[in-house]
Amino acid sequence: MKKLTSFLIGSLLLFSAACDNAAKTSVNAPEPGEAPVTPASQTTQAAKEDAQSELRRRQLNADIRAREERNLVTGDLTERAAADLSSEVRSKLEANIPGGQLTVKAAKDGTVTVSGTVNNQEQLAKIEPLSKEINGVKNVIVKATVLPPKS
């Protein structure tokens, strides 16, 4: 038992030393206090296309299904934190409404308010049914408008 305890403590110390720089999340991240470098337009466009790709949509939907299954297992179906509802609805909308510029606010009673812009009327019509697919969402208020993308 003493060997196991000392092994666990040693592992914990080693792990905490390896994670000493928690503020920096990648090699390209700026050091604390350093001004971030603006990415090239090609990099920005590639990231945008990746975020709106079919693969990314499937990944986001799979993540949402996993959260919902976890909530079913734990019995957390309706009493959800507003931040959780906002996050899940935002992910669902991002995955299924490419190019939308939407913000999501949720209240404790399960009311979700979606604001911002979408590219067409079809996307606007998708907001409410997609939002209601998330467990815990009882009412959806859509304040979004249609603003076609600039060419």
Image: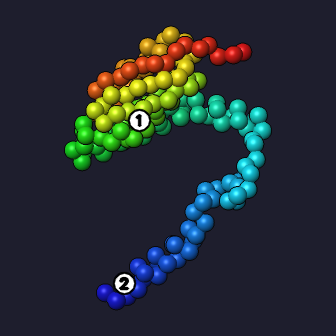
What residue is drawn where x is 38% and y is 33%? 106
Can residue 61 be spotted in the picture? no
Tell me if mark 1 has few (under 14), some (14-19) or many (20+) residues whose alpha carbon lies within 10 angstroms of its own. many
Q: Mark 2 and mark 1: span between their CA atoms?
A: 41 Å
Above or below — where is 115 with respect to 74?
Answer: above
Tell me if residue 91 comes above or below residue 27 in the rendering.
above
Which residue corresponds to mark 1? 86
Residue 122 appears in view: yes
**Residue found 74% across the figure and 51% down from its top:** 35
Q: Provide the residue designation for mark 2.
A: 5
Q: Spot the residue most to the left.
A: 75
Residue 50 in the image, given as x and y percentages of width and height: 62, 34
Residue type at numbered disc 1: Ser
x%, y% of residue 2? 34, 89
Q: How many marks?
A: 2
Q: Nearer the viewer, residue 89 or 47?
A: 89
Q: Left or right of 37: which side holds 4?
A: left
Residue displayed at 57% across by 63% down: 22
Which image quarter is the C terminus in? top right
Please say if 77 is above or below 35: above
Q: Position of residue 8 (x, y in %)?
A: 41, 79
> Which residue type does callout 2 highlight?
Thr
Q: Quadrant of residue 135?
A: top left
Disc assigned to residue 119 = none
Q: Residue at x 65, y 16 (%)?
A: 149
Name the side, left or right, on which 56 lies relative to 105.
right
92 or 138, nearer to the observer = 138
Q: Position of residue 46 (x, y in %)?
A: 69, 34
